[in-house]
Image (cartoon, rainbow, N blue to C red):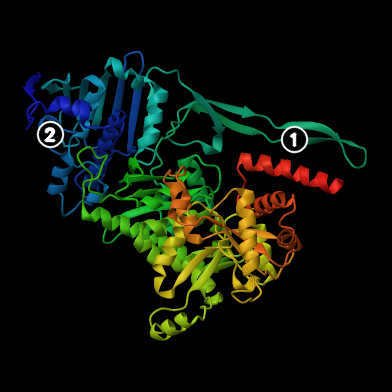
């Protein structure tokens, strides 16, 4: 005989809210119902371990999911501990009274609660997001228990009575509503199970109701006790007549006799119950790590390397973080870090747990201790979460510094791929920067790698100009700051090749920094190394003393005044800054330099979408440097009134610009036309 009752709900009208708003993703009901089944099996195993229950001889823990597109139903069947009528009344009809919580309280001295997923007792009700009616058929593992049938149509009323289930466990049947019939489709359910339940600690089998039986053929030696045999197949050995070395014919066996068995197709579990992260790092091979990466992230490019997280105290956390090839610009990289709670998928890239810069990686993190909110899909704010985030940051930093110290060859090999990630991490996370900054590498013009401290040590501090004023202040500030150390760098080896050649001629070195992030990163280094007075300067920011002959202040005054006037007039640039220097290489006629400060300001303007603004409002822009030792420059100075001199001035300026940055379309059109005109003059 069945009876009816009202669901015990503490807050008025909470049921429609649960149905519509408890979970942001409607497919999550699959995860919740499978998780509940896992919990029921875990609890039964605990009771068995404590001697309070004995498994049948053929017991194998499993969860079955059966979809029926004709009946528009979806079933979840577990062989866990089941419930009697009192327990159904207590755990199902009193919403938000958690069975897991109550079970832990009862067996708190004997059970390890890490393995029990449910905390809130609301997961079951996620079924009503997709179902008009829900039936529960359950049989408790208790001696003499009677089966129970419970049903509810999503209102606040239910009915409960004796059922007809004959095996211990619980079967939940969802009668899907019209908007949710997609979940009666086998392929859709498989997709959801693979999303949430790929690593559940219990095997999960999906099938379609009334589907025709499928078969497979195996060798007799592979037959298992639980296989259903359809027929035995014997295949005789195959022979062939062949000619031997002596020209005689003989019979040769080309395939041996085979004994095979046709069996009902074995079901294949959707879940891998022992995912790689649950194993000890010493038990895992490189190939297993790569295979796991391919399987989880569907990425067939091999990861560079990985970090296996394995922590038991002060909190339980396991996982694997992979470094994929990320040598594209940092702002277009997207990693995926999957967060699990007891092998149950929670979400991708939860920013409270995963520091922002680590989002560039791919990986899995499983933390049973995470303080989840009621829908198990978001985190409750908790200082504990910050500790987890700090721990992950520390482990990544330790891995990188350890590689730099003990596996330098591979660290250098990976550097170009992982450098955007590390630089981004240093900028975003101070603790990470403190650990890793001195293990960042700088690659020089010869392709050789240096750690930041090693490169700084190899560069001589810039000589201070010994003007009288500087000499006076030097005595006063002797103890205050180290002399400035300038690190020259290149952002485009082709564009800046003229400057690179000048550096090489003087035996000088520079480092290559060509990622978008490098502009922000060098500012970060300068700030962190403020006491050491480190300054980065692009090689086209100035003409250093190494490239120039020493001349007195007045020696080139006439040339400077004349050439400044000539070039400003020819180019129509009244504010153009012109410097005349005696460069050691007389083949160089002209160069353009842009002060480091101005260029960084321009970079910042581009980054923040201010490219249309006039850079000159922030100070001077390019400086044209003319070489007084160059014959073409001397010709212009000596023939200032010649009709072709304005054209030569324009050409020299454009040539200087070309070695500094690309010309814009109008400038390039004029440059080509002018080059043709100059060639015609030569042809005459």
Give the number of the mark in front: 1 or 2.
2
Given residues 149 and 76, the one toward you in this image is: 76
Q: Return the x and y of residue 466 as percentages of the image width and height.
A: 51, 81
The residue that disc 2 covers is: 87
Q: Return the x and y of residue 268 as percentages of the image width and height.
A: 44, 33
Q: Return the x and y of residue 398 as percentages of the image width and height.
A: 41, 64
Q: Return the x and y of residue 463 as percentages of the image width and height.
A: 53, 78
Q: Residue, x 37% and y 56% (percent of image)?
A: 428
Given residues 217 and 269, the one toward you in this image is: 269
Indicate left or right for 648 with 665 as reference: right
Indicate left or right for 327 with 504 as reference: left
- The answer to whether residue 89 is above or below residue 161 is below
The residue that disc 1 covers is: 254
Q: Is residue 166 visible?
A: no
Label 1 or label 2, whichever comes before in sequence order = 2
Q: Is residue 263 visible?
A: yes
Given residues 282 and 456, the one toward you in this image is: 456
- The answer to whether residue 184 is above or below residue 334 is above
Q: Residue, x 64% and y 76% (percent of image)?
A: 550
- Extreme-bottom residue of the structure: 475
Q: Quadrant of the N terminus?
A: top left
Q: Residue, x 74% and y 62% (percent of image)?
A: 638
């Amino acid at each position: 005989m069945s009876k009816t009752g009202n669901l015990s709900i503490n807050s008025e009208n909470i049921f429609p809210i649960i149905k519509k708003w408890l979970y942001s993703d409607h497919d999550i009901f699959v995860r919740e119902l499978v998780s509940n089944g896992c919990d029921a099996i875990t609890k039964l195993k605990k009771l068995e371990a404590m001697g309070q229950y004995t498994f049948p001889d053929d017991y194998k823990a499993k969860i079955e999911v059966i979809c029926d597109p004709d009946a528009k139903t979806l079933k979840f069947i577990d062989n866990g501990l089941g419930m009697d009528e009192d327990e159904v009344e207590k755990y199902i009809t009193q919403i938000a009274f958690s069975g897991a919580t109550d079970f832990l309280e009862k067996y708190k001295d004997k059970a390890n609660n890490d393995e029990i997923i449910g905390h809130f007792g609301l997961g079951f009700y996620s079924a009503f997001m997709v179902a008009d009616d829900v039936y529960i058929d359950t049989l408790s593992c208790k001696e003499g228990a009677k089966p129970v049938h419970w049903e509810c149509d999503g209102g606040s009323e239910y009915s409960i009575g004796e059922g007809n289930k004959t095996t211990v466990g619980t079967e939940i049947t969802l009668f899907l509503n019209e908007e949710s019939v997609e979940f009666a489709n086998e392929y859709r359910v498989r997709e959801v199970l693979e999303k949430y339940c790929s690593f559940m600690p219990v095997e999960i089998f999906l099938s379609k109701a009334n589907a025709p039986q499928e078969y497979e053929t195996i060798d007799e030696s592979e037959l298992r006790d639980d296989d259903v045999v359809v027929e035995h197949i014997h295949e005789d050995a195959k022979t062939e007549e062949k000619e031997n070395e002596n020209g005689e014919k003989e019979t040769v066996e080309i395939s041996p006799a085979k004994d095979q068995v046709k069996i009902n197709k074995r079901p294949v579990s959707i879940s891998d119950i022992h995912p790689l992260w649950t194993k000890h790092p010493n038990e895992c091979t490189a190939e297993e790590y790569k295979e796991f990466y391919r399987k989880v992230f569907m990425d067939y490019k091999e990861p560079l390397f990985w970090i296996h997280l394995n922590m038991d105290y002060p909190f339980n956390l396991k996982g694997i973080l992979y470094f994929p090839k990320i040598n594209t610009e940092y702002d277009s990289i997207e990693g995926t870090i999957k967060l699990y709670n007891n092998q149950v998928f929670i979400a991708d890239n939860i920013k409270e747990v995963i520091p922002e810069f680590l989002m560039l990686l791919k990986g899995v993190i499983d933390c049973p201790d995470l303080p989840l909110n009621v829908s198990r899909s978001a985190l409750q704010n908790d200082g504990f979460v910050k500790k987890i985030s700090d721990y992950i940051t520390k482990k990544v930093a330790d891995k990188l510094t350890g590689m730099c110290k003990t596996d330098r060859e591979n660290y250098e090999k990976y550097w170009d791929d992982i450098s955007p990630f590390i630089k981004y991490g240093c900028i975003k996370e101070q603790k990470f920067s403190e650990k890793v900054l001195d293990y960042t590498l700088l690659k020089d013009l010869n392709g050789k790698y240096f750690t930041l401290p090693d490169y700084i040590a190899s560069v001589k501090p810039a000589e201070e100009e010994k003007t009288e004023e500087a000499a006076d202040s030097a005595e006063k500030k002797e103890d205050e700051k180290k002399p400035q150390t300038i690190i020259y760098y290149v952002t485009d080896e082709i564009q800046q090749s003229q400057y690179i050649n000048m550096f090489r001629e003087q035996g000088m070195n520079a480092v290559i920094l060509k990622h978008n992030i490098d502009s922000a990163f060098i500012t970060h280094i300068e700030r962190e190394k403020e006491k050491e007075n480190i300054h980065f300067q692009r090689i086209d920011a100035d003409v250093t003393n190494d490239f120039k002959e020493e001349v007195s202040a007045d020696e080139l005054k006439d040339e400077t005044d004349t050439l400044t006037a000539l070039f400003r007039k020819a180019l129509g640039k009244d504010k153009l800054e012109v410097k005349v220097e005696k460069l050691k290489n007389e083949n160089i006629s002209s160069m353009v330099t842009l002060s480091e400060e101005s260029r960084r300001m321009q970079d910042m303007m581009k980054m923040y979408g201010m490219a249309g603004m006039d850079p000159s409002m922030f100070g001077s822009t390019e400086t044209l440097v003319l070489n007084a030792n160059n014959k073409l420059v001397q010709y212009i100075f000596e023939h200032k009134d010649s009709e072709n001199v304005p054209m030569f001035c324009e050409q020299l300026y454009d040539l200087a610009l070309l070695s500094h940055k690309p010309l814009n379309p109008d400038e390039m059109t004029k440059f080509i036309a002018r080059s043709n005109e100059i060639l015609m003059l030569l042809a005459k």
